Image (cartoon, rainbow, N blue to C red):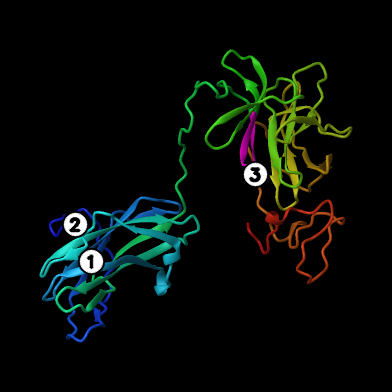
Amino acid sequence: MNASTPLGSFRLCTTLPVAAPVLALGSAPAVAALSIVSSTATTAIVFQRQTGLHVEALVSNAGSSDISLTASTLKFYGVGGVDRSTDYTVAIAPDNAVSISVGTSVVLTFTVAVASTARTGLVTIQPFVTGVDSGTAAVSSAVRALTAASWVVSQPEVFWEQLFASGVPGSPPARSLAAMAFDAARGRAVLFGGADATDQVLSDTWEWDGSSWHEMHPATSPVPDTGDVMAYDPVRKRIVLLADPQDASHTAKTWEWDGANWTDRTPASRPSLRYSPVFEFDPGLCQVLMFGGEPFGGPPLLTETWAWSDLAWTRLNPATSPPPLARAGWLTLRARATQSCLPGGWRATSCSMGPGTGTAPTGANCCPPFLRRSGSTS
């Protein structure tokens, strides 16, 4: 890369005062040789977890001898000059120049990756360059650009990416009305049932590990079904399936998946048979909640609220409820400080923690540690 590299295609941003270059070593007189004219970023908005970003710095040699570069990096500053360099990983391109001739300039290219935890907002980018004067052996440093690059960090864009082609051997057949949930303990998405393209009802179980599908072969399994719902229960580390089996029983079934086998957990007291209710784990209550659904035989839709905990269903009777609902997909619930799981991680009297002890709560009904939160997160 050389001085002729065009910069017009890049966005020039915030102007900052120039910091005087420093010459420190050697007996020869200090010469302010290195100068960073500008830094530019190829994009104005970046996202957490984004990689392959590029920042360029135009560096000139105003000294009397060639300069061999010894170090080049970037620093990142948030509003108020707060150093946020730990939010980024920087690598200098391997084809960058290693020396700058007298009276010339070069463009240094840096490749940047943004951490998943990078703080959002406006960030100013400043190059830091150090070199050795070939004539005087003096160390020359330039630490700020007259025209500095900047970008705005945002949360990642949400988009779909096809990871596995339909119909590839070793993948589930195409289907509709299947049940699916993510097992956080094992890092796998679990798929059950549904109907194929010929409307044949299925009872197969598959797992997705992030790169491949695996058909599971449990010793026991729910009957073929469509419109079932699933949620992950982190307290028991099990996938919970609420089934409306299309068989002669006409009885709602509750199953658990442990990664190898399905176990029928249907208790005597349970919700009535229903199709596609809203079904999700509530980290505030530390329970799987179920709302609504379409009853066997069709509308009217239901407005019941049930909770699954400790292998039992409990009918809840809130003072107010949403309107009747079915086939609405998934409900995401966020914990609040006022809910029984917070603070300290309990949801029932059998879960206790000594005040001020700082120790984990004990008892069969305690939330897992990663579910505990302090303060309102709504």
Numbered badge on residue 10:
none
Amino acid carrying label 2: it is Leu
| In the foreground, 280 or 33 | 33
Vertical side of 146 occupied by 157: above or below: above
Residue 184: image tag:
3
Where 142 falls versus 46 (above or below)?
A: below
Residue 130, given in percent of the width and then of the height, sits at 27, 71
Secondary structure under the numbered disc 1 in the rendered image: strand
Q: Main secondary structure of the magenta part?
A: strand
- At x 82%, y 51%, the residue is 365
Q: Is residue 185 magenta?
A: yes
Residue, disc 2? 7
Q: Secondary structure at mark 2?
A: loop
Q: Depth check: 14 or 64 in front?
A: 64
User: Which residue corresponds to the image point at 69% horizontal and 24% vertical from the top-left?
Assistant: 217
Q: Which residue occupies the foreground of this view, 64 or 176?
A: 64
Marks 1 and 3 sit apart, C-alpha to C-alpha, by 46 Å
At x 44% / y 47%, what residue is drawn?
157
Q: Residue 17 vs residue 305: left or right?
A: left
**Residue 322 on image: x %, y %:** 70, 42
Range shown magenta = 179-191
Q: Quadrant of the C terminus?
A: bottom right
Q: Are marks 1 and 2 in contact (CB under 8 Å)?
A: yes
Residue 107: in sight, yes or no? yes
Residue 119 counted in the magenta span: no
Could you tell whether 194 is left or right of 127 in the image? right
Tell me the amino acid under the disc marked 3: Ala
Q: How much space separates mark 3 and mark 2, taking CA atoms?
A: 47 Å
Q: Nearer the N terminus, badge 1 or badge 2? A: 2
**Residue that badge 1 annotates:** 38
Q: Amino acid at mark 1?
A: Ser
Q: State the separation of the CA atoms marked 1 and 2.
A: 10 Å
